[in-house]
Amino acid sequence: MWSYEHNGFSVHQIPALRDNFIYLIATDEVLACVDPAEAAPVVAACRQLGRKLTHILNTHHHNDHTGGNLELKARYACMVAGAAHDALRIPGIDLHLSQGIDLRIGDLALQVLDIPGHTTGHIAFVCGEGDDTALFCGDTIFGAGCGRLFEGTPAQMWHSLEKLMRLPDSTRFYCAHEYTLNNLEFCLARISQSDAVKAYSTWCKDRLDKGIPSIPGTLGREKQCNPMLLPADEAFRINYAKLHGIGEDAVSVYTHIREARNHW
Ligand SMILES: [Zn+2]
């Protein structure tokens, strides 16, 4: 388990399954679990912290994000919060969320964002503010990548990514998988060999060699290096469109890069 301090809350990162991360958001009053892929490592982490789980927060319905819901709810009698849109697909759901309904649980305030694309009911949770923002984005932004489009359209996903890019550059993003190195290899091979991407790759290899996750990173670095976010940069977009003979608009460029990644 790795732990990160923010103003008024801390985040504990728990590895699970093959490459998932489960998070605990801890305040004096609340211990909320984001995307419990499975129950056992969460129970072990609660024991280590000497605390009981008060809430489960699901970013989307996939089993590797909700697999521990029912067992944890039975054990701790905790509340389960997830997207209203996916109420029928989220086990044990009590609180139905969507953008505009901000969540205050005890001394923890969470902003909810609708970010469809990976699934149609995907949401994100934002904690803290300004330079001390934490983003829980599930399978939407990964280190140097983004989630696959299982249910949504490329345009939906692009607009969701744009929404997340409006958060401050210093935002630490806590995504649900360690895919960064593989994503960077794709980026270097197919999209960009900028100094920033090379530096990110060196940093990532070094972290993983030491047994430390590459997540959380910052949104600022993703804006510079993440091939799925690069279409926001006009110069990149124009060059890429020319090279591949496609439209210069961000959705066309994003769609082309997402497709290239699917077949890489
Ligand atoms: Zn998923």
Image (cartoon, rainbow, N blue to C red):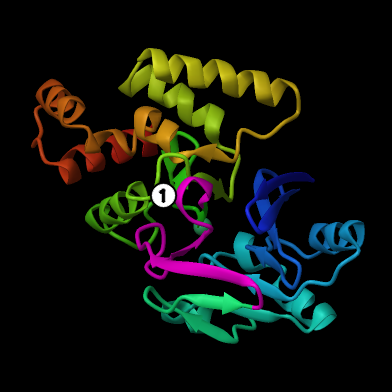
- For the point 12% across and 27% down, which residue is it? 238
Residue nearer the viewer, 136 or 261? 136
**In this rendering, is residue 217 above or below 48?**
above
Q: Nearer the viewer, residue 211 or 26?
A: 26
Image spot of residue 8 (x, y percent) = 66, 59
Q: Residues within 10 Å of mark 1 (few under 14, many from 20)?
A: some
Is residue 236 a member of the stretch shown in magenta? no
Residue drawn at x 72%, y 21% as measured from the top left:
209
Q: Residue at x 69, y 65 (%)?
A: 33
Q: Is residue 182 above or below residue 217?
A: above
Residue 171's spot in the image, x, y percent?
48, 45
Q: Is residue 161 left or right of residue 127?
A: left
Q: Nearer the viewer, residue 63 or 34?
A: 34
Which residue was labeled with disc 1? 148
Q: Is residue 127 magenta?
A: yes
Q: Position of residue 105 (x, y in %)?
A: 62, 77
Q: Position of residue 96 (x, y in %)?
A: 50, 83
In the figure, 58 relative to 10: above or below? below
Where does the magenta region start and end? 106-133
